Image: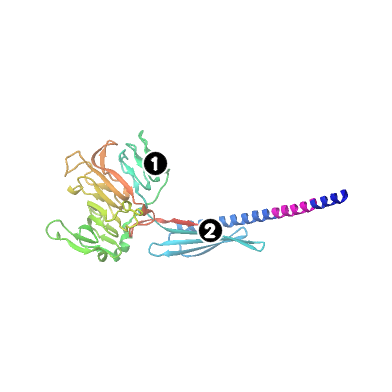
Amino acid sequence: MGGKASLFLVIGFSLIFMIAGRNFNNMAGDTTDNMINYFYDTKTHQMAASGINLVVSRLYTDINCQDGTYNFNFDGGAILVTLRTTDYILNKKELISVGSITTGGKTYSSTFRVIMKPSYFSKFAYFSDNEGYNINWSGKDTIWGPMNTNGSIQFSGNSVFHGEVSIGGAVTYNRNHPIFDKGLIKNYLITLPASGIDTVKKYAGGGYQFTGHSVVYFEFRKDSVRYRYSTSGSGSTWTYKLASTFAPNGVILANNAELHISGTVQGKYTIAASGTSGNLGDVYLDDDIKYYIRPDLTLDPPGSNSTDMLGIIANSDVIVTDNVPNNSNITIEAAIYAGSGSFKVQNYDQKKYYPLNSNRGFINLFGGITQKTRGAVGTGDGNTISTGYGKRYRYDERLLYSHPSAYPGVGTFEIVSWFE
């Protein structure tokens, strides 16, 4: 019995080791297969990403890059990128990149999808080509949203910036400690177009154009508008129009004129003034200009029921008028563009309609400002407003992915969404 028992024991252990050995061999084979699959999956993933980057770089250097397909060969594999326009009005582009490798009778592939759109200056809460001479950011200044200046900035107080800040020139702190919540990028330049008003002129034919009048007074009145050409005498009678039929595509241009605006905006519009001499090409803000439904003040979710959006474009300056309605604070809800001039306050260092050396409160801006040269809006010691206005600028976050009609573009595309 002892011999038989020993024989069965040996046979049993042999079977166990045979099964275990087979399992170990299978595990080793599976591990090798998994490593091979992981290698080629990762490789095709990186190839697809590279295809996106290759075509995106073309769009950055050539905004008129045509729709089509692009083929690239890489290390035994292939990259196929398809570029097509999905929205011809907004000029949105879709890129689909497929990286693939066939080896050992098996094909590995990975796909990326990216949506891009032109970049517009309206995306900035604040943009200036230069900051002017001896104008400071004070301790009363707060900005939400992205900011860029190609110039240098200096501080007379502890300003607060809640968005990303990029600067082309120097920063002079003067022993102050401004707060950059999302960081500060230096040596960063963005070219301002020579004539941003050209974009408005391109689309004004589908809207409304004022011609032959050197001054235009215009008021938004929710679903209607009114305008006149003088405050007294001939031309002082208001003309009333339904807004939707007055400017079907939302673009309103005062050709070679000084434009005065105010009112409540219901819908999506851009209003602009062209001209290069005197006050022609200037836009004056004679009173509050507000949205009928302000998106950040609505509920379920914020802004869900607001389509109101305004672009204010001046070939020269956008100016807060020194008048009685603007004695105490002014509300501006719009994306502002002063192409060759500034966003500024008339008589910022004095006051005709209020006691001298008294401030006028705050500019409550919801939107953004783009200007050639930073304009002055008030005076003070850094923490106190002496004359003019303090700044309360809040960014309209819709401007990250949308823009007012015919707003000037940066001249490049930007990525809106990325799927992989």
The answer to whether residue 121 is seen in the rendering is no
Q: Which residues are magenta?
A: 13-28
In the picture as drawn, the residue positioned furthest to the left comes out as 233
Q: On screen, 317 above or below 381?
A: below
Mark seen at residue 50: none
**Amino acid tagged 2:** Gly
The residue lying furthest to the front in this view is 1
* Callout in the foreground (1, 2): 1
Q: Residues within 10 Å of mark 1 (few under 14, many from 20)?
A: some
Image x and y of residue 397, in percent = 36, 52
Query: Cα distance, mark 1 to mark 2?
Result: 35 Å
Q: Looking at the image, can residue 311 be seen?
A: yes
- Magenta span has 20? yes
Residue furthest out toward the top? 175
Relative image position of residue 45 (x, y in whole percent): 56, 56
Figure quadrant of residue 407:
bottom left
Residue at the spot x=36%, y=38% of the render? 178
Can you tell which quarter of the image residue 80 is in? bottom right
In terms of image quadrants, where is residue 231?
bottom left
Location of residue 156 in the rendering, given as x and y in whole percent from the top left corner: 32, 36
Element type at marker 2? helix
The numbered disc on residue 180 is: 1
- Viewer-side residue, 68 vs 308: 308
Q: Toward the viewer: 145 or 222?
A: 222
Q: Hey, what amino acid is under mark 1?
A: Phe
Residue at which label 2 appears: 51
Using the image as rendered, state which of residue 92 and residue 280 is in the foreground: 92
SS majority, magenta:
helix
Seen in the picture, residue 135 relative to 121 is either above or below; the reply is above
The residue carrying pointer 2 sits among few (fewer than 14), some (14 to 19) or many (20 or more) residues within 10 Å by Cα, namely many
- What residue is drawn where x is 33% and y is 60%? 406
